[in-house]
Structure formats: structure tokens, C-alpha cells
């Protein structure tokens, strides 16, 4: 029972780490890549709608391409993770590790590209950077759903905030203050804050942090949360 509790806590830490990454890359996308959200697709759809209307010279190409990239990567990840629940119950398994490792590799490549281009990146390159990051976030979101930690979607906080205010707070008690729903909101806020601050140094720095955290999360999950790790701990 203790081992299962530890695994649950580690899974929560892992998904909170990925949520933090979302905040970081969304800050990069919005502030450095021409107001494109790379994780929050609701924001992209709203910006795209206003941009199509010609409001405030908002971008259209960047949000549209990021939306397509996120969706396509999520579909691919869903195909990779597709199996009957009886054969593949929710939780961490090797395909989750593979998806996150590919995401970490992509973010590493983006870090290198950003290190060489910096603020001199042209409009087309910014779209490519945003689209690639959005693709990483799309597969990350699906991987997080497969791990199935309650209230931790890693990319969405609107529904989490609604659940917090409409379900958790009315129940009252200590759990109304200290809970994972609030933790998810605070974590993505902290990620955006850190991402914005690191942009003052160089655009490659937040990309590098996102790559390192994603790689570390994949490593942690593989060693401590995979079925093989569970067998080792019970053996």
C-alpha cells in the first residue's frame, strides 16, 4: 500500500512538472513567437477568430499552424497509445516514456535553433518554432491523459478552475485550500512566470529548461512508474 501511495505521489509530481513546462513554453510562444500559444489551444482559437476578423492586427498564420500541429501530434500520440483498456490500463508505460522522450528531443533541437537565431528569427522561423512546440504539447497532453492523474491535464486550467471553485471550495475544509486542482493552476502560472523571466536572458534558456524538465520527467517515469519498476518494487 505504501509503495502504491509513493507511486501516486510520483505520478502527481511528474504531471505537475509537465504542467510547469506548458506554462514555460506558452510564455515563449506568446511573448517571443508573435503571440502564439503553444499549449493553450483555447487561447489560439480565440486569437485566430479575432485575427480573421482583422482585430488589432492579431496573427492568423501562427495560431492556425500551431492549432493544426497540436491536433496532429495529439492524434499520432493517441494512435501510439491505442490499446484496449483491459490490455493497457491507465498508468505509466513504455510508450508514454517514448512520447515524452521524443518531445524532450524536439525541445532540445528548438533550444539549439533558438540559441543560434535568438531575437533575429524571421516570421517563418517563428511559425516553425511555435508549431513544433505545439506538437510537443499535443503529444504531452495525450500522454498525461494516459497516465491518468486526476485533475492534472497539463495543458488546460479553465476546467480545473471551474472544478476548484464549483466543486472543491463549496465542500470546505482543509482540502479546499490544499488540493491538486489549485496546485495545477499555481504550477502553470509559475511556469509562465519563469518562462517570461528567462526570456529576458535569451529565448533559448526557457526552451532549454522545458527540454530538461521533459527529459527528467520521462526518466523519472521510466525508472519509478513503469510496470517493470512496479514489479521490481514488489519483488
Image (tube, rainbow, N blue to C red):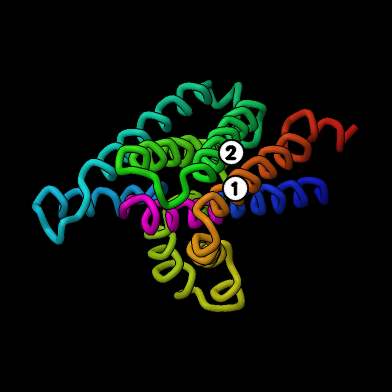
Which segment did they paint magenta?
Answer: 19-36
Q: Where's residue 15, x and y in %?
A: 60, 49
Label 1 packing within 10 angstroms: few (<14), some (14-19), many (20+): many
**Picture layout, residue 3 above or below residue 192:** above
Q: Is residue 90 visible?
A: no
Tag 2 residue? 108
Task: Name the residue rendered at 79%, 35% in the picture.
Answer: 230
Q: Residue at x 38, y 38 (%)?
A: 131
Q: CA distance from mark 1 to mark 2?
A: 6 Å
Q: Nearer the viewer, residue 191 or 106?
A: 106
Where does residue 70 sit, x and y in percent of width and height?
38, 37
Q: Is residue 182 magenta?
A: no
Judge whether residue 230 can be spotted in this image. Answer: yes
Marker disc for residue 208: 1
Which SS class for mark 1?
helix
* Location of the C terminus (image quadrant): top right
Amino acid at each position: 500500500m505504501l509503495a502504491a501511495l509513493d507511486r501516486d505521489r510520483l505520478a502527481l509530481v511528474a504531471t505537475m512538472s509537465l504542467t510547469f513546462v506548458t506554462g514555460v513554453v506558452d510564455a515563449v510562444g506568446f511573448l517571443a513567437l508573435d503571440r502564439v500559444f503553444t499549449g493553450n489551444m483555447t487561447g489560439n482559437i480565440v486569437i485566430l477568430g479575432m485575427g480573421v476578423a482583422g482585430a488589432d492586427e492579431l496573427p492568423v498564420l501562427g495560431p492556425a499552424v500551431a492549432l493544426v500541429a497540436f491536433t496532429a501530434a495529439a492524434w499520432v500520440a493517441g494512435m501510439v497509445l491505442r490499446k484496449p483498456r483491459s490490455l493497457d490500463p491507465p498508468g505509466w508505460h513504455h510508450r508514454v516514456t517514448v512520447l515524452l522522450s521524443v518531445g524532450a528531443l524536439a525541445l532540445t533541437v528548438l533550444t539549439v535553433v533558438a540559441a543560434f537565431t535568438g531575437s533575429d528569427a524571421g516570421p517563418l522561423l517563428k511559425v516553425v518554432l511555435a508549431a513544433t512546440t505545439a506538437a510537443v504539447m499535443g503529444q504531452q497532453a495525450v500522454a498525461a491523459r494516459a497516465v491518468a492523474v486526476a485533475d492534472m491535464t497539463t495543458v488546460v486550467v479553465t476546467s480545473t478552475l471551474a472544478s476548484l471553485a464549483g466543486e472543491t471550495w463549496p465542500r470546505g475544509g482543509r482540502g479546499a485550500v490544499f488540493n491538486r486542482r489549485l496546485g495545477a493552476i499555481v504550477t502553470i502560472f509559475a511556469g509562465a512566470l519563469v518562462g517570461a523571466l528567462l526570456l529576458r536572458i535569451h529565448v533559448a534558456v526557457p526552451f532549454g529548461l522545458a527540454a530538461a524538465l521533459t527529459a527528467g520527467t520521462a526518466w523519472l517515469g521510466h525508472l519509478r512508474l513503469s510496470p517493470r519498476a512496479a514489479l521490481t518494487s514488489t519483488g
